[in-house]
Image (cartoon, rainbow, N blue to C red):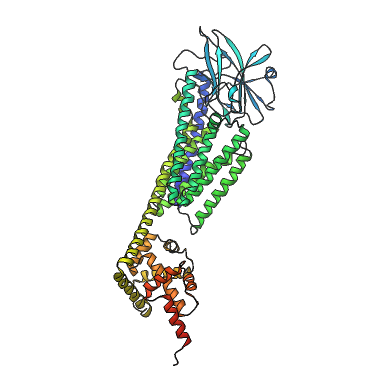
Amino acid sequence: MKSYLQRGAVFFAALLFLSVSALQSRAEGESNTCVSGQIAGIDNTLLEKSENQLRALNVEYFLDDTGMLESDAIFLREFTHKSCGSVIQAPLPGQALWLRFTAQNEHDKAKAWIVTFAEIIFDEVVLYEQRQDEGIIIAQDGRTIPSSQRASRTIKPALPLAMGSGETRTFYLRIAGTVEPTITPVITTPGLLTDWSTSAMVINALFLSYVLSIIIFSLIIFRQIEVRFYKYYTLYLASQFIFSFLYDGWAHHLLGVELPVTILSPVMFFFTGVGVFANVQYCRILLEVDARQRRLKVLFALLTVAALITTSLAVLDPWTLALPLHLSYILSPFILLIVSLIKIREGLPQARPIALSLLFYVCGLVIAVYYFIFPPEIVRAAHAYELILLNPIGWGYYLAIVGETTFMLIAISVMVKALQQQKQAAILEADTLRSDVTEHAEALENTNARIGALETILTEDSDKNLLPPSEKRFVDRATDCVLAHVSDENFGVKELATALATSERTLGRRMKKSLGLTSAAFVRSVRLGFARDLILMRQHNTIAEVAHAAGFSSTSHFSKMYRQEFNETPGEALKVATSNASNPVTP
């Protein structure tokens, strides 16, 4: 276990190193950006070149802490120039961020450009033009803006900017309400915006369809096998689906839901926390962490409590208390990855695909969360695919979910296949026994006779070592376990295997080798022997009481099995025992 913990520590250290390297690269990128043209006094324009379809918006900014200033009052405020880089700190709830920029059309014909953002969640984005001493609203967009007043129908907010030939005009942007910690404004052509928005929409729609199909698959297929294998996994997938559905704006664009970020952000963080909680729970089940593994059980309990606490904090204040949930979002699957490596060493078949699943999950989440906090710069672009690649939050998240679900389904399938084989073997065994009872009565009697002879030898001649010591101890332990739960009707082969710390298949093989019995026949034989002792000692007055005490739910079934075992009915045996008690033999 120590070696796996050491490997995990090395892996996590590598992730931290990559994060620091990325941060340094970002700093270098910012300095390069400064050289590339983000200099005060440069007006915003797009040249008629294929490689110049989008560029960072050169702006000055002012943070309105009250969020109440109107456009007329903002003209008198002192703005700060964004001298380096395109990323600006986002306003908190109750605040508003104002951006001022000058656009210039140097072409000999009118141009229609678009002001948009790398981010997609905004309550309100309003574009004003300064005309003398007043601000005129040019366009507005956002998730709290009614559809009839929005400037665009795209997923991304888009504000059209019409510029006549040779014009130079000053504009103001008011931005309020966002989930992301930063804002990256850009100016682009309508064509590139359409390609960008459409590509992002198609990719997200494919992702949501994939997650929905996995949810349906788990509900239909896994539910028919065992409820515990699907309920937490379905909860996990549903939380991821709802989070992405809300984050990418489908609720607003498809359903017309106008939720401000003060409501939307806590809801999204709630489903993020639900995903962390469900991830811990279904990994606990698939990795077969039981009560005997005390340390792992305590670890999973701590992970569960951490998920609940960090989720509560993030829901209460997503803007200042969300960091613990971000850490839990990454550290929780990382710890589960270490546990899966330990389980691989123990020989658990499904542990390998679980480990691969969690590895994809951790790597994808590290990328997504890192670039959520430290978004990349967007300087210029010519094609939509460049902008998609410059969105590591999205593809890191998709990598995490798609990779995790792919290998986790393999892990669940491995476990389900083993269960199906066990059930099919049990059904086949039951059919064989039923056929033997009805069609081969004589052979069954001979078998029972041999079993009875073996029991007689074992009870009457205990000094003979018919079994190897290890097998005899195993049979004795199994017998003691059944007798300890003899009155429990639900104590069967599965429970006996668990109590003996072995698998059902191994239990059946050892019973067949030692006694020539199946596991089910062995449990039944011990129960019937206990019932016979109760009858002979007259511990109960009715057959129903004896059957219940021996763990049989059906009196008729008990009588049938008793007759097959001892060649007499329990009623006959009770009658003989009662007669002997009434007429004791005088020595």
Q: Is residue 335 visible?
A: no
Relative to 129, is 144 above or below? below
* Residue closest to the eye, 105 or 36: 105
Q: Position of residue 511 (x, y in %)?
A: 36, 66
* Residue closest to the eye, 481 or 93: 481
Relative to 555, is 349 above or below? above
Q: Position of residue 82 (x, y in %)?
A: 59, 21
* Residue closest to the eye, 226 or 514: 226
Q: Quadrant of the C terminus?
A: bottom left
Determine the image quadrant of residue 40: top right
Q: Is residue 336 visible?
A: yes
Q: How many marks?
A: 0
Q: Position of residue 432 (x, y in %)?
A: 33, 62
* Residue closest to the eye, 133 or 22: 133
Q: Is residue 146 left or right of residue 541?
A: right
Most distant residue in the bottom direction: 587
Relative to 489, is 106 above or below? above
Q: Position of residue 114 (x, y in %)?
A: 53, 18
